[in-house]
Amino acid sequence: MASPNRRATVPERIAAHAARRPDALAVTDGASTLGYAQLHTRARELAGRLHAAGVRAGDIVAVYLERSVDAVAACAGVLSAGAGYLMLDPEQPALRTRELLADSTARALVSRPELLRRDNLERVPGVAYLDCPETATGPGALQEPDQDGPAYLNYTSGSTGRPKGVLIGHQGLANLVDWYQHRYQAGPGDRISQLVRPTFDAFALETWTCLSAGASLHIAPDGVRQDPELLQDWLCRSGITVSFVPTPLAEQLFMLPWPGRDEGCALRELLVGGDRLTRRPPAGLPFRVHNNYGPTECTVVATCDLVDEQQVPVDDVPPPIGRPLPGVTAYVLDADLTPVAEGAPGVLHLGGVAVAMGYLHASGDDDGPFRPDPFRALPGTRMYATGDLVRQDETGRLHYLGRVDEQVQIRGIRVEPAEAETALRRHPDVDRAVVVGTDEAEPRLVAYVTARDAAADPRQIRAWLAERLPDYLIPATVTVLQELPLTPEGKVDRRALARPLPGRADTTADTASAGGRPGAGPPDAGDASGVLALAALWKDVLGVPSVTAEDDFFEIGGDSLRVIRLVARARRHGIPMRPDDVYAHPVLSDLAQAVGSSPAATEVIAS
């Protein structure tokens, strides 16, 4: 008999909408569309096939598909089977995918044959393979998920050098769905966006809150996801009413002129998260902005705050991360796990239903930052030590202050430098390796290595890492040193290494050459004005003292976040550019030729 306090699971909520509004739009990616009855039928059919393949309640099933209607339907099918899904990103290195698949002990893998062949994933022992169904021939059995079982498995960076699997339960997911529907009044009339990569836990926030509310999920084309102006246009054209946008991109959206509601903008709620919000929205935006905070170990969102443009920041302090969600408790504790005084800094600990089930493969006695909650009398309650330093103001809002360990947030994803270090040490030319986050407003990973071979090539090392690590774990630069700097105690001096990125010398083995790669000098007066203008912008965005016409944006510290910054600044100076231009033409001279020059461009030339 079901508990009177039992919350409906995501598959049950989708089934209810399919019964009430079978033809209503559930999900579209521009090329394919499913109504609620179609989505429910496809999910149940896959659930039946999973059961036939031996999948049982509580098992993990991997889904290896691009952002698409198929991916959403596959995950819904896994949930309908009573299992938990693991999203694997086809854009990540195949070696990384195989590592995660093996670690997850997944009972089955849902994908397409061409993807499996491309990445040599066809032969993993103990894994059943199922094609993603494009149509449904008949429903299978709906397995009521165990409320105490996993809804999904998501990997986060590990301090031991290996990624850690985080198990999120159905109770936490149901709590997130209920909060979202109440706070944002989401319902059948809403159009909700899906922007993030499937391995980011915000995928669950975008997808299941939408479909549980009976709204329609609109999967954004890849081409708009990193371009503020194109994204703004897509949001307005698609009639999106509620959207989650990663913080760095959202801050760029703030600065654009927005049409009003009577001019075609339906957006009323903009959720931001994944990184520290540093900019308040200006007055006059047609939507409200909500700042969300939450580690992977707590179901997507742990705290939230409405960012009011009327609130005047004190001493340029960033907006708060707000108060805990219903069902979530927040404690600000000292090293002895004692609550600190109001306004004093302490480490944030989270408790309640949203806390993850724990790390995959961890024993009950060895689950790292998960521990029993000493402030609640109920048996089995636990809390999670986030490692984030916060303070709580007199209104009860929490303010993020930084980290208490070496974890770094890279483009909205929390990473452990030790994971990149472990990969570096496996390179045949590397003897010792240290990876640190730079001491910048927008930190990057930088690597310092000592080489077994004097001919060690940092560019080759980065290329080698790119075949094994996701992009956010690849250091922006690799510097070859004779010796690593040490503290008086004989430990590696990480603080000395964690400085802002220096010149391009860090991307070459010739670390004494501050002027750039050997044989290439600074651009001279004979270079086209477009090259000179872009060189000035590159120096500003990348924080390097000089660049040459032959430099590669991504080899001297560039990444997807800095692409957005570069494009925004170029446009302000009258240089026409899109993010795709930078990815297609990463070398400075090629990019200048591709985007051309303008009269305004010559005014950007720096001294």
Image (cartoon, rainbow, N blue to C red):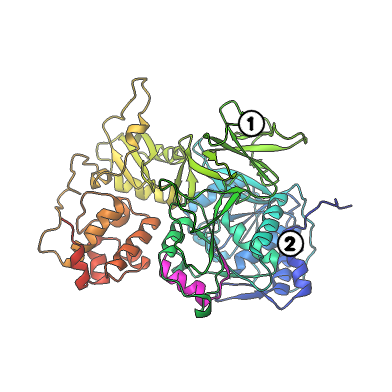
Give the residue number, with chain letter if any, for mark 2: 11
Direction from residue 136 to residue 467 in the image, left or right: left
Task: From this view, report whether residue 280 is shown above or below residue 444.
Answer: below
Magenta extent:
226-243
Amino acid of disc 2 = Pro
Q: Return the mark for residue 588.
A: none
Q: CA distance from mark 2 to mark 1?
A: 33 Å
* Residue appearing at x 61%, y 68% in the figure: 70
Q: Is residue 402 magenta?
A: no
Direction from residue 365 to residue 461 in the image, left or right: left
* Residue appearing at x 37%, y 20% in the figure: 489
Direction from residue 352 to residue 292 in the image, left or right: left
Q: Nearer the viewer, residue 108 or 600?
A: 600
Q: Position of residue 354 (x, y in %)?
A: 67, 47
Q: Position of residue 8 (x, y in %)?
A: 77, 58
Task: From this view, report whether residue 415 is shown above or below residue 214.
Answer: above
Give the residue number, with chain letter if any, for mark 1: 366
Q: How many labels were placed on the picture?
A: 2
Q: Position of residue 131 (x, y in %)?
A: 63, 65
Q: Nearer the viewer, residue 550 or 386?
A: 386
Q: Is residue 227 magenta?
A: yes
> For the residue labelled by badge 1, is the local secondary structure a helix, a strand or a loop?
loop
Q: Quadrant of residue 32?
A: bottom right
**Quadrant in which the C terminus is drawn:** bottom left
